């Protein structure tokens, strides 16, 4: 069976879910291919994706203007509105998938119609997996397409938001989070001793993970300076992702830091799951990807809302408010040493050994 996954590199969560699904699918089910119609299509669409990421890093609050422009402009709502669609149609036709699954709101209408027309056998099913955790100002109406065969989401709140916007109840399914393999339950998860040894950490200090340096507003330096001014005994893991400039800066800084500091480049899924399972606190933006991984690992989280909250992030904060004992957020990252002195809340859910409910639903659709 052939699975085509439609994604976009806006933020990090969409591609994380796309790659996770491809990994699960190719483990015995068949072939899977990921396509990025926006980034690989018309130049204006590539520019739009780049603008999204620029705003996310520099001024998240400005996303309200960008988000509502896209909501009402409906640039990809119909096939006639999509510029330079021929390349996409030819690639879909050449792959001829049995199933098309979208993990991005703006690929669920015009691109869905193009994909359906491009498949010669005419039997391809179309599925939406929405990674939003709950309803909120940033839940896009473009997630919902009643013509799709199935709408799936990680939690009941996700599907409720879709039904509220017109998705038929019989076409919605709560499947649990779609994550990379190490975030699910298994008998091979590293223990705390292995975690400490991997990063040369002390068992006598609490470990705080700074997760704002990859895709979001980078607050590493501000937080590190605040801990150096404080008397809070701790050690810091600073996630830098592919941001080599920040990584080099922190490598120089750690030699003069009073607080033990470990700057980290992009980590494997196995390492990220280990870090989140054993961290005493994660400081990060309330993006769907990182927040869902923290929920899967039961990680205590303090949310960074400096420079404003993106509309999409309000959805995840709403989920956290409902399911956690409390919500701790700050627009001043320098307050982190003060905030970690409190009881930092976490949300923990039961994780299966894999996204079995989603994969089972996809199998059933293809066999119909």
Image (tube, grey):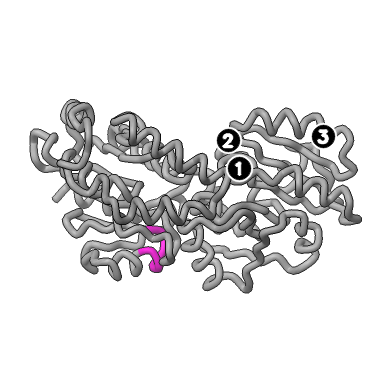
Q: Nearer the viewer, residue 182 or 85?
A: 85
In the image, residue 315 lies in the stretch drawn in magenta: no
Q: Residue furthest left?
A: 121
Frontmost of labels 3 and 1 is 3
Decide: is 106 above or below 138: above
In the image, residue 154 lies in the stretch drawn in magenta: yes
Q: Mark 2, residues whose alpha carbon is within 10 Å: few (<14), some, or many (≥20)? A: few
Q: Is residue 175 left or right of residue 289?
A: left
Q: Position of residue 186 (x, y in %)?
A: 53, 48
Quarter of the image for residue 256 reads top right
The residue labelled by disc 2 is: 268
Q: Position of residue 92 (x, y in %)?
A: 20, 31
- Circles 2 and 1, Cβ within 8 Å, touching? The answer is yes
Say which residue appears at 35% left-offset and 40% top-offset.
7
Residue 272's tag is 1
Quarter of the image for residue 216 reads top right
Residue 251's tag is none
Q: Is residue 289 left or right of residue 49?
A: right
Q: Nearer the viewer, residue 362 or 215?
A: 215
Q: Which residues are magenta?
A: 153-158
Q: Earlier in the sequence, mark 3 or mark 1?
A: 3
Q: Earlier in the sequence, mark 2 or mark 3?
A: 3
Say which residue appears at 60% left-offset and 59% top-offset.
298
Decide: is 25 above or below 227: above
């Amino acid at each position: 069976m052939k699975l085509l996954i439609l994604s976009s590199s806006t933020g990090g969560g969409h591609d994380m879910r796309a790659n996770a699904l491809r990994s699960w699918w190719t483990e015995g089910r068949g072939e899977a291919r990921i396509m990025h119609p926006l980034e690989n299509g018309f130049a204006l669409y590539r520019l739009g994706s780049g603008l999204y990421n620029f705003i996310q890093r520099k001024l998240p609050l400005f996303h309200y203007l960008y988000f509502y422009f896209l909501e009402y402009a409906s640039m990809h709502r119909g096939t006639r509105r999509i510029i330079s669609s021929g390349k996409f149609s030819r690639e879909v036709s050449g792959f001829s998938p049995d199933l098309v699954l979208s993990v991005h709101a703006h690929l669920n209408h015009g691109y869905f119609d193009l994909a359906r027309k491009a498949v010669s056998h005419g039997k391809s099913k179309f599925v939406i997996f929405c990674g939003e955790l709950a309803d909120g100002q940033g839940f896009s109406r473009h997630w919902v397409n009643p013509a799709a065969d199935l709408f799936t989401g990680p939690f009941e709140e996700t599907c409720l938001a879709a039904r509220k916007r017109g998705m038929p109840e019989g076409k919605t399914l709560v499947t649990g989070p779609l994550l990379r393999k190490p975030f699910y339950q298994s008998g091979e998860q590293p223990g705390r001793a292995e975690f400490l040894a991997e990063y040369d950490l002390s068992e006598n200090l609490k470990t705080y993970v700074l997760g704002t340096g990859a895709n979001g507003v980078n607050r590493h330096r501000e937080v590190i300076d605040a801990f150096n001014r404080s008397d809070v005994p701790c050690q810091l893991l600073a996630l830098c992702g592919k941001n080599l400039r920040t990584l080099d800066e922190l490598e120089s800084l750690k030699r003069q830091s009073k607080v033990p500091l470990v700057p980290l480049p992009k980590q494997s899924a196995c390492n990220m799951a280990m870090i989140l399972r054993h961290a005493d606190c994660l400081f990060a933006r309330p993006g769907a990807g990182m927040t869902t991984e923290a929920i899967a690992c039961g990680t205590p989280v303090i949310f960074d809302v400096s420079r404003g909250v993106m509309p999409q992030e309000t959805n995840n904060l709403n989920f956290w408010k409902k399911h956690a004992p409390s919500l701790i957020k700050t627009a001043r990252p320098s307050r982190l040493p003060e905030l970690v002195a409190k009881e930092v809340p976490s949300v923990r859910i039961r994780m299966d050994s894999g996204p079995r409910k989603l994969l089972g639903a996809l199998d059933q659709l293809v066999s119909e």
